[in-house]
Amino acid sequence: MRLVVDLNKCQGYAQCAFLAPDVFAMHGEESLVYNPHAPEEQRERLARAVAACPVQAITADGLDDSRDGGEASDAR
Amino acid sequence: MPADHVDWLRREGRIVIVGASLAGLRAAETLRAEGFTGELTLIGDEPYEPYDRPPLSKSVLLGMASPRHTELPHRREIDAKWRLGVPATGLDLTAKRVRLADGDEVEYDRLLIATGVRARPWPKEDEARLDGVCLLRTRDDAADLYQRLKAGPRRVFIIGAGFAGSEVASACREMGLPVTVAERAGAPLVGALGGVIGAVAADLQTENGVDLRTRVTVTGLEGDSAGRVRAVHLSDESSVEADVVVVSLGSVRNTDWLTGSGLGAGPRGIACDAGCRAFDFRGIVTDDVFVAGDVARSPHALFGYQFLSLEHWGNAVSQAQTAAHNMICHGADRRPHLWMPAFWSSMFGVNIKSVGVPPMGDQIMITQGSLAERRFVGVYGHQGRMVAAVTFDNTRWLEFYQRQIERGAPFPVEFPTVDRRPEGRQPVDADFPDPSLPTHGPMVTLSGYSPADQQLLFHPARH
Amino acid sequence: MPHASMLRQITDFANRANPYPIYEELRRTPVLHEEDGPYVISSYYDIEALLHDPRISSDAANQTAAGDDELSQSEGTGLPPSFIRLDPPEHDRLRRIANSSFGPPHRPRRIESMRGELGEIVTGLIDGLGDTRQIDLVDQFAYPFPVTVICRLLGVPREDEPRFRAWVDPIVAGLDPDTRTSAESERVAQEARLQLGLYLNGLVEQRAREPRDDMLSDLVNSRGPDGAMTTMEVLSTAVLLLIAGHETTVNLITNGMLTLLRHPEILERLRNDPGLSVRIVEELLRYEPPVQIVPQRTCITDIELRGITIPKGSRIWLMLAAGNRDPERFKDPERFDPDREDIQHLGFGSGIHSCFGAPLARLETQIALAELARRLENPRLVEDPPPYRQNAVLRGPRHLNIAFDNLR
């Protein structure tokens, strides 16, 4: 699953790092680092993190079963 | 433009986006989201689908992410033709055609240029070719650099202490690697944040074990007989042995391909109006060519209508959305791109964020916290107004200052705050370097009032 | 318009079961000021802005200087104020130290790793309901669950709960509007806080000698870049976490079950899809936030809001629950809709004082609601509305009697 965090919005509440610690981590008290390519087994935790973000800064695709990835279907 | 033309365009026009990175992707999504059903083509010089760059100097170098997997999530299906790995090489405004490196030509009814920037290379080409001399802009750059860092070099040398260079230095220290940083100015980050904040960044580096050399330039890179870099020579006549050299001298706008096209494009980017329509070289706005992202420079009402070119992630997203909207709507429905400049960085575990245009400020006050603790809010002022703010590990207050800037709040800041210290009561010189001597790629370039200003002198960063 | 009574209506117990019509009326005067009362702020954007405004203080000392009102709790002389009643830099320092034993970056997995344990406690409580067809959800589940969790996390013996509950109740009652004029209840609350502190001090001394894997041990032994907490700071932090750790979650769980029972189609969906609990909890935090009001702020300089000058020293109430249903911010705000695209609620506050325990409260409530939905067969409310607790700030049912056909 791909994800991106709008770090302009992010205010370091760390909810994602609590709820999906293998995908998101705090580097210091306030800055967030994350893996933009979360492995499949993190799906449930990633969904919790996305929903919990107090500033709704996380965009992820492939979270729903109906995968919306434009990447595979678009012809080169 | 007759209304029926726009309706036709929305329905069956051809839109070409040159640049398949963040701005290009978000523009494509917006076009589809707003009902564009015609033919959409994305052209990108890299062979990869759009990926995110900020992680390349942060989570990738910290080992949390793979440089090969920072592809951006798609917000929706965009049903586009992708021409990836093929740079655009020319533009014919009259015939409405983009020329590609493979000889192909792509016709458009409307064009969006989002070609961004590339890393400024080391100017001496033979030295730049030495093995171990690296740039950091693309995912290939990041993969290469990460491999070299993981191999445990004896010392990493970073040329330029802007955000990118400082972030790489931070990652190196995290990996336990000895690192030297050379900066022509008096401190890191001075181009973007001024000398007062730069001094804090300097302390941060040295306390974390960076060998920071300021007010020096690199005069040459020395290779060994096998063509590997082995030493860096500095203007103070010293030299430093290093087997990885990261050239972090800011960026060059990707406008070369537009040379001779008649667009108002040059080293400082492509001038456009607040609605993202490109100017031609005469300063006349075009109807069918739009610009977004790092390569654009556009006037901002909040900052004296100065033309801002912003290498900011959020600007790319916002401007792409505005440009896409304006490309397929009637004149009266167009929106101006009035995004409040904002950026973030993190280094040595400290979160740095900013809103507004710090280099426009001539004075700064620390309104919360303290520089010594490296947790603070700094406010920049210009001509009696607040024009920017920066936080170190204080991001939750930043939106307050953004609103103050939007309202043109007065400067100096007189009001008390919950953490106002005596040191922050008086404004001091923000200590930006002479703007005619740019450091290694300040994040914001104030580039005058005239859309196709031919009088601007460009000073390439040199060491 | 007779706004003279608005403040009374907020605190009036008669409106506890459904304060939302009052909040709707409040929003028509988004900056409400009655005589010498507080400035009451009820629109989403204003609340959000003030939660990030550095001219607004949470410091108990500023509040006292401004004169107390019925919802503000002075923490008195026994223990120093906890970080919730402090401004930076003291707030930041204490919260950082507390966080170093709770969450990222220092303890990134402490809460996540409790998930299995949370599930077991929930299962144990539901199994323990026995052969019954009716329960009081509050006493039999929504209270004991978070109490057990916070006890384990802090390192407080669960069997001491009856003892400290005797102190917790008066402390929480100290927030009760109806006790506002009672110096006696104020004194009782202070005394209870001190007694709870003394009780915890026994545990803290023990943990200083023999640290275990719990937060009390970490708090008393913290020696990070921010230095150590004093013993008094450890105690007021522990009191805060112990109380906040269950007094708010009990309401979130109970409000959650009440709301689901009023929306049986969503309860049914949750039964079939436990993952829906994630969105349900976020929407609950908007729709029925457990902390309805932040009454403890003071402005330290004149501030201007919607053309009204709020003078320096004024007390401010931020009406989180009113902002959460502000139609300027949320489409169809009176509708409970876990599917809404945009649930950026104020349920945990925002800014530097945003809820410390939010990730734990989220996990607890997600697991609790999903399990209740799965295991209670054909659940229904015995009375609607249920009886409420007195408190207007920490608002929730005192009892929630639920009948059902069977336990799955």
Image (cartoon, helix red, strand yellow):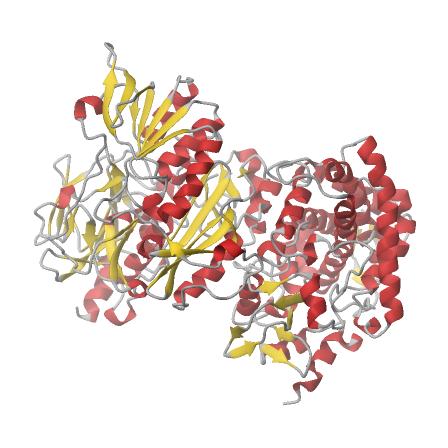
Q: Name the residue located 51 percent from the left edge and 66 percent from the top edge.
A: B415
Q: Is residue A61 visible?
A: no
Looking at the image, residue C315 lies above or below residue B82: below
**Residue B220: x, y in percent?**
22, 24
Front-most of residues C73 and C391: C73
Is residue B368 among what the camera can see? yes
Above or below, comparing residue C358 to residue C209 in the picture: below
Image coordinates of residue B82 in percent, x first then y, are 27, 41
Query: Which is more toward the observer, B327 or C362?
Result: C362
Vertical relation: C316 (above or below) C79: below
- Against B26, residue A72 (above or below) is above
Quadrant that contains the N terminus of chain C: bottom right
* C385 left or right, relative to B416: right
Please give the name of the residue rendered at 90% of the width and 55% of the height, measured from the top-left corner.
C166
Going by the picture, which residue comes out furthest to the bottom? C1
Is residue A37 left or right of C99 when viewed as pictured? left
Q: Which quadrant holds residue C200?
A: top right
Residue C114 in picture, x, y percent from top left: 72, 38
- Closest to the observer, B412 or B78: B412
